[in-house]
Image (spheres, rainbow, N blue to C red):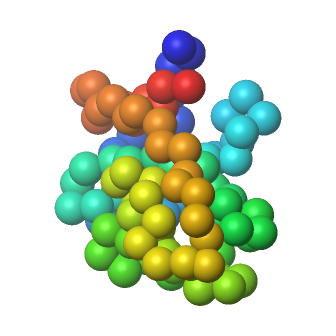
Amino acid sequence: MTETTIGIITDIGPSVMKEFKIKELDILVININGEFHAIKNSCSHRGCKLSNGILRGENVLCPCHGSVFNVISGAVVKGPAKEALISYPVLVVDSKITIQI
């Protein structure tokens, strides 16, 4: 597993989503009440970028066909998507946000 530091906690405010390219992977990092989570940034239904979607609490709404995913687990909350998203471990140490891939 590789660790990549993407910034500090003030770079991603509460209820904010920000996309990152790490090792050719498109990853979406989300701040939910000061806890950081990372998921694959493309819908498992048709590959649309979730960073263009809407964050509602712990869920992100895909802008293309309305699938909803839980940003903490990557689970499908509402289809048409059927496959969960990959989620990545996030560490916060000394205010630095690190993604494990």
Q: Position of residue 52 (x, y in %)?
A: 64, 75
Looking at the rendering, in which quadrant would you find the C terminus?
Answer: top right
Locate residue 32 relative to residue 101 in the image: left or right: left
Is residue 49 visible in the rendered structure shown here?
A: no
Q: Residue at x 58, y 65 (%)?
A: 82
Residue 44 figure quarter: bottom right
* Residue 93: quarter of image: top left
Q: Is residue 10 above or below residue 21?
A: below
Q: Quadrant of residue 32?
A: bottom left
Indicate the position of residue 100 as horizontal and vertical percent values. 48, 25
Q: Nearer the viewer, residue 34 or 86?
A: 86
77 versus 40 height, above or below: below
Q: Residue at x 73, y 28 (%)?
A: 23
The image shows residue 75, relative to residue 6, as above or below, that is below
Residue 3: percent from left, percent from top = 51, 19
Q: In the image, what residue occupies the spot 39% across and 64% down? A: 70
Q: Nearer the viewer, residue 12 or 53?
A: 53
